[in-house]
Amino acid sequence: MFNRVRYDAHYREHYRRVRGLCAYLLGTEQDADDAAQEVFARGLKAFAKFRRGDDFTPWINTIARNHCVDRLRDRQRWARILSEATDADDLEDPAESPVGRLISAHTATAVEQALRSLPDPYRLSLVLAYYGDASYDDIAETLETTRNHVGVLLLRAKQRLRSALESQEAIA
């Protein structure tokens, strides 16, 4: 049975974390705001199916993860269409994430730049694993791949992230 008061309490408790996950996955604050609102709207519609004894965090994170991946796929489709029509190189300038404020400004900027430089599958796998606390199976389902391939993606993503950070240090 639906309980609006219970859902509102979950919303207040989890909104910042969901919004942060959306910001990391989508890359911009504005997209994160829109996505987080949509995630909780979808959650509200599906809340009647949520079992009272289950943990809300993985449930809402799964909705967020799937929604953001769908938005990224749509963004890539539109980018291809627009680039074919206009030969545009870059569609948007990603903004600083909220997590960056928790770490020193220099380190946060370097990590965020390195993370943004990764191809989507690598960036998504890292963010889902380390920020979204997703299991290999969850990541495999989200990215529509195998569990073993998730391990390969994470290994390569960490290698590329490390390399990008090292090259940033060499420049500085």
Image (cartoon, rainbow, N blue to C red):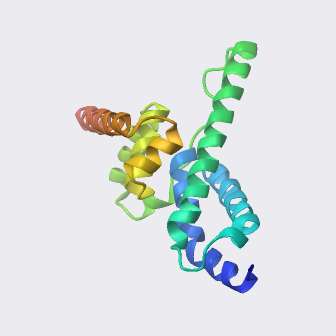
Query: How many labels, in total?
Result: 0
Residue at point 52%, 69% (across, down): 57
Residue 89 sits above or below residue 74 on the image: above
Does any portion of residue 109 appear in the rendered image?
A: no
Tell me the quadrant of the picture where the C terminus can be found: top left
In front here: 144 or 165? 144
Q: Is residue 100 left or right of residue 81?
A: left
Residue 115: percent from left, percent from top: 41, 41
Residue 60 sits above or below residue 137 on the image: below
Residue sitting at the far bottom: 5
Residue at point 73%, 20% (across, down): 81
Residue 164: percent from left, percent from top: 31, 34
Residue 1 sits above or below residue 38 on the image: below
Query: Residue 78 falls in which quadrant of the image?
Result: top right
Q: Is residue 152 left or right of residue 131?
A: left
Residue at point 66%, 49% (across, down): 31
Residue 2 sits above or below residue 103 on the image: below
Tell me the quadrant of the picture where the N terminus can be found: bottom right
Residue 33: percent from left, percent from top: 67, 58
Residue at point 56%, 42% (across, down): 94
Query: Residue 86 falls in which quadrant of the image?
Result: top right
Q: Is residue 93 left or right of residue 151?
A: right
Residue 68: percent from left, percent from top: 61, 47
Does any portion of residue 123 appear in the rendered image?
A: yes
Q: Is residue 108 left or right of residue 56?
A: left
In front here: 75 or 88? 75
